[in-house]
Amino acid sequence: MISYADFEQVDIRVGRITRAEAFPQARKPAYKLWVDFGAEIGEKRSSAQITKHYTLEGLIGRQVMAVVNFPPRQIGPVLSEVLVLGVPDAEGEVVLLSPSQDVPLGGRMF
């Protein structure tokens, strides 16, 4: 088990996808994402294996939850700056986590 103090170290924020592109260089089907977390954090890049349930056009404007304090990770030609969160459906395909209502960008999950 982890302590609550350990959990508090993970900074999970809400952002809005502002741009999405195909990521043909990825080993598994994925998209490149640009996510706006508001004035404090700004726009960050990520990649996500979410091609089964989402279209590029349908992602624009969607609010998502992401870990914003992991170190950047190089994924092929993309420097992923945040980890967009999701859970697998019954077939193992990722479904994005998002607030049930529109909330201010950069809001921290607690």
Image (tube, rainbow, N blue to C red):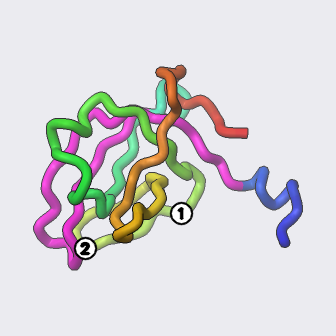
Q: Amino acid at mark 2?
A: Gly
Question: What residue appears at the point 47 percent right and 21 percent down from the top-left corner?
Answer: 102
Residue 42 shows in the view: no
The quarter of the rendered structure image containing the C terminus is top right
List the residue tagged with mark 2: 76
Q: CA distance from mark 2 to mark 1?
A: 16 Å
Rendering coords of residue 95 (x, y %): 39, 53
The range drawn in magenta is 10-36
User: In the picture provided, is 75 more to the left or to the right than 28?
Assistant: right
User: Residue 1 magenta-drawn?
Assistant: no
Residue 29 appears left or right of 99: left
Asked if residue 37 is positioned above or below residue 87 in the image, the reply reads above
The answer to if 17 sits in the magenta stretch is: yes
The quadrant in which residue 43 appears is: top left
Query: In which quadrant of the rendered image does the N terminus lie?
Result: bottom right
Q: Residue at x 28, y 48 (%)?
A: 33
x and y percentages locating residue 104 in the rendered image: 53, 21
Give 38 or 96, whichever is nearer the viewer. Answer: 96
Q: Earlier in the sequence, mark 2 or mark 1?
A: 1
Residue 108, image x, y percentages: 64, 35
Height in image: 72 above or below 54? below
Q: Residue at x 48, y 46 (%)?
A: 97
In the rendered image, the vertical position of residue 76 relative to residue 84, given as above or below: below
The dot on residue 9 is: none
Q: What is the chief secondary structure element of the magenta stretch?
A: strand
Query: Can I make out residue 61 in this image?
Result: yes
Report which residue position mark 1 lands on: 71
Q: Residues within 10 Å of mark 1 (few under 14, many from 20)?
A: few
Residue 98 screen position, x and y as percent: 48, 39
